[in-house]
Image (spheres, helix red, strand yellow):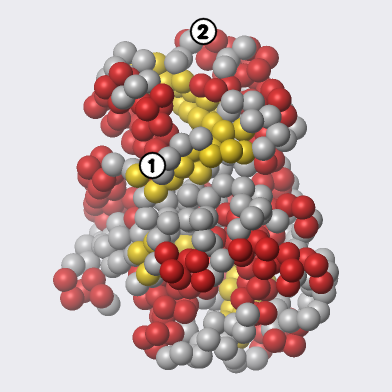
Amino acid sequence: MKVRNLVLSVSLACAALSGAVVPTAAMAQAKEQFFPVLVYRTGAYAPNGVPWANGYVDYLKLVNIRGGINGVKIAFEECETGYATDKSVECYERLKGKGATVFQPLSTGATFALTEKAPVDKIPLITAGYGRSESADGGIFKWNFPIAGTYFVAADAIIQQIGKKEGGLANLKGKKIALVYHDSPFGKEPIPLLQERAAQLGFQLSMLPVTAPGVEQKATWLQVRQQRPDYVVLWGWGVMNSTALKEAQATGYPREKMYGVWWAGAEPDVKDVGQGAKGYNAVTMQHGTEKNADVVKEILSKLHDKGQGTGPKEEVGDVLYMRGLMSAMFAVEGVRAAQERFGKGKLVSGEQARWGYENLNLTQAKLDALGFKGVMRPVSTSCQDHMGANWARIHTWDGSKWQFSSDWLQADEQILKPLVKSAADKYAAEKKLTRRAGADCQS
C-alpha cells in the first residue's frame, strides 16, 4: 500500500506543499485537529479519485491559511486505498489512533465495512453523496452522515426530471427505463427507490449490471439495443462511465435520453468522448463545475498562484474537485459547530465532532461567507436527520462543458422517508440496535 503523508500546520502555511511528503512530527503537537484523508490516486478509479482528493486537501490548506478552526490548525494525512474495501479498512485502522476527527472513505463498499467499526471507535463517517441511503436515519445510524444527499435522492431527482421531460410524472406510465449499474453495493443502492417509483408510476424497470471496473460493456449495450428503453439511467464510476457513453454512441442510443448519477457526471467521464457525449445528462449533488465560485477564486489566489496548490491549477473548480472541496467543508464545519458547545479554539474528540455533524446548520449566509455562494443550498442536520438537504439539479454536457439544464429538484419525502425507515429498521433488527428517541436522541 502506498501511503502519502501530508501534514499541514501553522508553520507550513507558506510552504510549497504540492507533491512534497511532509514529515509527520507536527502530528505530535497537541493543538492540531487531525483529519485522515482516504484517497485513491492510483488504480482504475484514479482519474475520478484524484480530483476529489485534490479538492479535499486544498480546502484543508485553505482553512489553515484562514486561521484554522477558531485558531485550531489542521493536520492531515493521506492513505491510498485504490478504491479497494480491504485497503480502505487498513487505512482506517492505521489512522484512527492518531486522533482521527472523521473519516470519509469515498466508497460505498468501504462505508458498509466501516459502519460496523465507527460505533466501537466513536469516530463519525461522512459519506456525502454515497454510502448507505438508509443512514440518513440518525435514529439508527448514530455515526453515519450522508450529508447533502443519498442515492435515493439522486435516483428520485432523475425520475422527476425524466417526468418533466415527458410532460409530467403520470406520463411515465408504460415507459421503459433501464438501469445500467456498477455491480457493487454502490450500484445497487438506487434499486429500492427505482422499484418503488416504477410501481407507483407504472413504468417498466430493467436492471443491467456491469462487472467492475466496467471496461467491457458490449453485452450490456446489446441488451439495451434489444430492449429499446425510453431512457437509460447510468449508475457508474470511473472508466465505466466513458465506456458506457462510447457504447451508446456505437449502438446509436441517444445520449440525451441518458441520465447519470452524480458520480457519472464529471469531466473525466465525458472529456475523452467529447462531442460523442453531447446531450448526456447527469444529476448533480447541488454543485456543478464552479470556476467562478468565490471559494475557487480564493484557492487559486492563496494556494495555486503561490505554488502551494494540490494538483493541476486548471482542474480547480471542476465537478469532482468541488465535490472534494464541499466534503472537506462539511468536515471542518462540523468541528466548528462542536466547538460552539465544547469550547471555541479547543480540539474536539471524534465523539464531540459527531455532535457537531448532528447539529450542522449551514445557512445561506454561512455558505456565502465560506465562499459557496451560488454553489449549494443550506444544509441543516439533526439527531434524526443525518442528511440535512435533499436538493439536486441536472446538468448536461454540450460537447465541451457542463451546463445546468434544470431548476432545483427536491426529492419526494413521501417516497424517501418510508424507504429509509424501512431499511434502517431492518438493519437495526439484524444488528439488535435500539432506535434513539427523545432524550436518548441527544446523547
Residue 19 visible in the displayed image? yes
* Gap between marks 1 and 2 measured at Cα: 32 Å
The image position of residue 108, as x and y in percent, is 50, 49
In the picture, residue 253 is in which quadrant?
top right
x and y percentages locating residue 397 in the rendered image: 62, 33
> In x, y percent, where is residue 350?
46, 77
Residue 20 location in percent, x, y?
A: 83, 71
| Towards the viewer: 417 or 98 | 417
Q: In the displayed structure, does residue 138 sit left or right of residue 234?
A: left
Determine whether 263 is above or below 343 in the image: above
Going from N to C along the chain, the mark reached first, 1 or 2, is 2
Local SS, label 2: helix
The residue to which callout 2 is attached is 226
Q: Nearer the viewer, residue 178 or 79?
A: 178
The kind of residue on which mark 2 rests is Gln
Residue 182 shows in the view: no
Residue depicted at 37% across the width and 50% down the height: 390
